[in-house]
Amino acid sequence: MSDIKVMLVDDEQSFVEAMAKRLTKRNLEVVQAFSGEEGLEKLKEVFGVDVVVLDVKMPGMDGIQTLQEIRKRYPLVEVIMLTGHATVQSAIDGMKQGAFDYLMKPCDMDDLLGKVREAKAKKENHEHKIAQARAMNIANRRGD
Amino acid sequence: MEKERHYSGIKRRLMFLIVLISLAPLALIAIVNGYQFKHAYESKVLEHLEQVVKKHKQNIDTFLNENLADLRVIANTYPYEQFKDEAFLSELLRNLQAEHGGMVVDMGLVDDQGVQAAYSGPFKLGKAVYADATWFKEAMGSQNYISDVFMGLRGLPHFIVATKISADGREWLLRCTIDFMGFNRLVENIRIGETGLAFIINRQGAFQTKPGIQLDAHVESLRDLVWGKHSAVPEPNHSHVNNWPGPQYKDFATAMPVRAIVADDPQRPGSTSIYVMTQLKQGQWALIYRQDTHDAFSAWYKTRNAAIIIFIAGGLSIFFTAFLVSAKTVKRLEMADREKEMMNEKVIEAGKLASLGELAAGIAHEINNPVAIMVEESGWIGDLLEEDEFGDTENVAEISRSVAQIKTQGDRCKEITHKLLSFARRTDPRQQEVNMNELIGEVVDLSSQRAKYANVKVHQVLDDNLNLIQASPSELQQVLLNLINNAIDAIDHKQGGEVTISTENGDGVVNIHVADTGQGIPDAVLKRVFDPFFTTKPVGKGTGLGLSICYGIIEKMGGKISVNSSVGVGATFHISLPASRGEKNGGNAEPVS
C-alpha cells in the first residue's frame, strides 16, 4: 500500500503535521521530525526512509548541516530541500551538496508529490544498480 | 543662522590669520629698520653738526686769538709812547683792518686811571674816561683781555680786546674794538637748513651775537647745559686769562668738547630742537648752534613718511586680499559642506531603503511559514472533503469553494512575500556579460500574452551595435519585466496603446528607454514612484515594491534609473548602465549566455 516512505523535517510543527496528513492520505508513509537532530535520530530508528523533505531554515542544526550528515550516513536516501524564497541561494548550495531538488514554501501538493516520486525513482534506480553490482561481484567471486 | 555664524567665524579667523602673517613681518621690518636707520641717520646728522660747530669754534677762537696776538705783537714791538701818537695808531688800525676784514673798529691807549690817552677810530672817544667801566676793571686785572659784548659809550654793541703794557712805572691798556656786526657775521655764517642758526652767549646768559629768533626763555637752560647747573666751571679766573694764548688755552678749550643734545622746545610744545654747543674764549662764552629737529632730520622724516605710506598701502592691499581670499575659501567650504550634506542625505536614504529591505525580508520570511501552514491546512480540508462520506451536500460544495478561496489568497500572500524577499535582493546576483537586446527580446516574449490581452503593441527599437554590459541577467530581467508590466498597466485596455523599448550606446554607458502612451504620472506622484510600498494601483493589485526593487538593482549595478512623464502623454523610464570595457557586440552576434 505505502510504496514510498517520506520523512518531513521542519521546525514548524503544524506544517509538518498538515503535510503528513495530506501525504498519508495520498498513500505515502510519513515520518515526522521537528529538527535536524530529530531527523537524524528517526533515520536511525526507522528503517527504509526513501525521501527526506528538509526545511533549510531551522533553529539548531540547519538544513544544510543536516543534509551533509544524511549524505554522509545514508548516501542512498534522497533529500528534497524546502525553502522560503529568501533562502533560494542556500537551497542551491544544498543542491551542490547532493540534494535531489528544492521546493519553495508554500508548496503545491502536486509539485511535492511529483518531486518525491522522482526522488524515489532515482533511489530505486541507484539501489537497482547497487544490487546489480553486488550480484556481479558475487557472480565474479563465484567465478574465481 | 547658526551655520552662517559658523562660516563668518571661519572667515574672520582666516582673514585675521592672513593679515597677521603677512603684516607682522612687514611691520617688524619697518620698525626695526626704521629704528636703526633713524639712529644711524640722527647720529650722522649730529656728528656733522658737531663737526661744523667745531670748525666754527676753531674759526672764532682763532679770530679772537689772532686779534689778541696781533695786539700783543704790536704792544711788544713798539714803545708805548708811540701809541700816544694818534697818527701812528691810525696807521696800526688801518693795518689791522686790512688784516681782519674791517672788523676792528677802533684802537685806543688807556692809562691806568681809565683815561683814553690816544684814540683812532670813527667815534669821538678821545679822552674818554673808562675808570668805571667793567671791562676796564677786568682788563686791568689780567694781562690779556677780551670783553663781553656791551654798548659802551658809543651806544653800539661791540667788544673789546685789550692787552696791558707796563712802562714808566705805569700800566697802560692797548685796546681795540671788534665790530659786533662783523663778528656776528662770523657766527651767522653757520646756517644749515631752514632753521639752523648759531649764536654765542656768555656765562651770565647774555647773548653775544644776535640770534635770528627769540630764544630768551631758553637761555637759562642753555647756560646750565654748557656750564653745568651749578657752574661746575669756575667763574672766569684771571690767572687763566693771563696765560692767553699759551698752551693752557688749548687745554682749556678741549675741556668742553662739542656737545650735541636734543631738547624740547619750550616755545613750541611737542617739537624738539637740536642744540650743538661748545665753549669759546676759555669757557666764558658758548657757541651754540640750534636747529629744529624736524628740519635737521627732514630726510629721515621724509623717508619715514614714505615708509608709512607704503606700509599703509601694503596693509590695505593685504587686508583686501585677505578678505577676498577668505571669502572665496569659505564659500568653497560652504559649497563643499553643502555637497557633503546632500551626499549624507543620499547615503541615509540608501541606508533607509536597505534597512527597510531587511525588515521586509524578515517579515516576509516570518509570514511565509504561517501562510504555508494555512495553505497546507486548507489543502487538508480539501483532501478530506473529497472523501465520499461527506456526500454532495450544499455545504460541502460551499466549504470546497471556501477552501479554494483560502488557497488562492494564500498564493497571493506567497506572491507578496516573495516580492518582498526580492526587494531584499536575494535573487541570483551573479554578473556576466549581457547583451541587452537579447534580454529585451526574451522579456517582451514573456509579456506578449499580457500585452495582447491589454490591447498594447510592444515595439523594439534596438541599436544593433549595442555595447555589452556586465550585469546579473536575472535581476535585469526582473527590472525589465517590471517596467514593461507597469507600462502595460498604465495603458487603458479599451483604448489600447503602444510600448516602445529602445536601446542606444551612450558615453561609456548603455541606455535603455521604456516608453508608453499611457495615462502618464502626475507630478505629485513622480517623485515618489521609486519609494518602497508606493503604488497607484488599486488595493490588492500592486504591492508598491516593483519600482523600488528596480531602483535598488540598477543602483547596485552602478547604473541610473529615472523617469519623465506628463499626464495624458505617457511615461518614459530611462535606464543607463555602465558598458563593459571596450567590447562591442556585433550586429548579428550570438547571444551571450
Image (spheres, grey):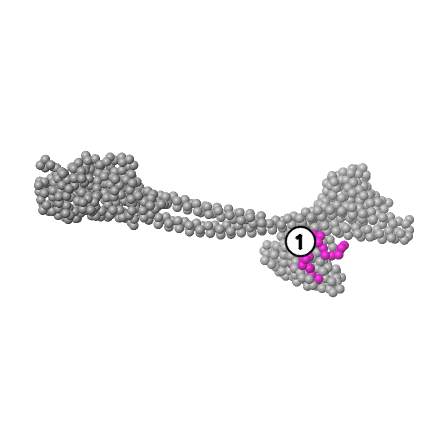
Is residue B545 depicted above or below A94 in this figure?
below
Tell me, yes or no, whether the highlighted magenta stretch contains residue B584. no
* Residue shown at the point (64%, 51%) measured from the top left: B556
Q: Residues within 10 Å of mark 1 (few under 14, many from 20)?
A: many
Q: Position of residue B81 (x, y in %)?
A: 8, 41
Residue under pointer 1: B551
Q: Quadrant of the C terminus of chain B?
A: bottom right
Chief SS of the magenta region = loop
The chain holding disc 1 is B
Residue A42 visible at all: yes
* Residue shown at the point (38%, 43%) measured from the top left: B32
Q: Which residues are magenta?
A: B512-541
Residue type at numbered disc 1? Tyr
Comparing B36 with B416, the one in front is: B36
List the single residue furthest toward the bottom.
B495
Comparing B44 with A75, the one in front is: B44
Q: Is residue B44 left or right of residue B440?
A: left
Q: Is residue B364 left or right of residue B14?
A: right
